[in-house]
Image (cartoon, rainbow, N blue to C red):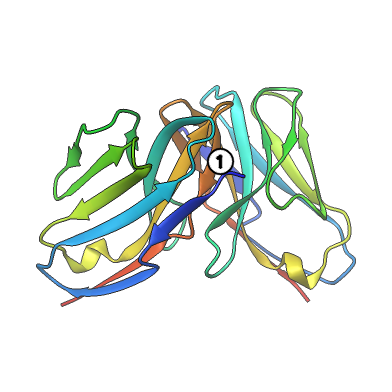
Amino acid sequence: EDKVVQSPLSLVVHEGDTVTLNCSYEVTNFRSLLWYKQEKKAPTFLFMLTSSGIEKKSGRLSSILDKKELFSILNITATQTGDSAVYLCAKETSGSRLTFGEGTQLTVNP
Amino acid sequence: NAGVTQTPKFQVLKTGQSMTLQCAQDMNHNSMYWYRQDPGMGLRLIYYSASEGTTDKGEVPNGYNVSRLNKREFSLRLESAAPSQTSVYFCASSEPTEAFFGQGTRLTVV
């Protein structure tokens, strides 16, 4: 069974804090690991990771994959209130099938 | 703008009624998906279609049918709606690098 587990399920921080969100997955038919940000509507794409140990960065967000330990992390530095959202992790398997985790609800307070 | 178009945005049904959710993408993607999103459960895959003419069950297919009419369109049908199908539904299409989502349909079954 494909399973993606995210932690924590919710997180409340103050502006300026750094947060780390976790995602673990099962190895079966793994092709890539994707991160999405969901605010009020549809998820928007953040990163796709296929190789271990190569960090991807976009502004204050970065992500890395560990294919040996089967997990990925998403880091957000100097958080802002606009970072408040649900962050979703998804595992892509063969046939472009995506399995999502429950998501982490991040709240950034001023 | 290119992307995934999903209709309707909102719908209220009575128990036992039927309806079809429409989805179309103009990015020439092979893979398309239907998800439902419920509080605390993340995105769960209902059905997916790896290519025109093929459909496969996801995690929660019971009570739903799908039709991949052509490469652009992937519809989701509820033959006899039940209150347990109250949810937000997302259609998505993907290529190997990322998935694009529609804006969602909020369905309430009373």
Position of B1 relative to B18 (above/below): above
Q: Residue B64, image x and y in percent? A: 80, 50
The reply to whether residue B38 is visible in this rendering is yes
Residue A10 as seen in the image, left or right of residue B87? left
Q: Residue at horizontal 36%, vertical 45%?
A: A35
Q: Residue at horizontal 39%, vertical 40%?
A: A34
Q: Nearer the viewer, residue A38 or A32?
A: A32
Position of B47 relative to B16 (above/below): above
Q: Residue at horizontal 21%, vertical 53%?
A: A75
Amino acid identity at mark 1:
Ala
Q: Quadrant of the N terminus of chain B?
A: top left
Residue highlighted by disc 1: B92
Image-quadrant location for residue B106: bottom right
Image-quadrant location for residue B29: top right
Q: Quadrant of the C terminus of chain B?
A: bottom right
Residue B72 as seen in the image, left or right of residue A42? right
Letter of the chain that mark 1 sits on in the rendering: B
Q: Residue A95, image x and y in percent? A: 59, 26
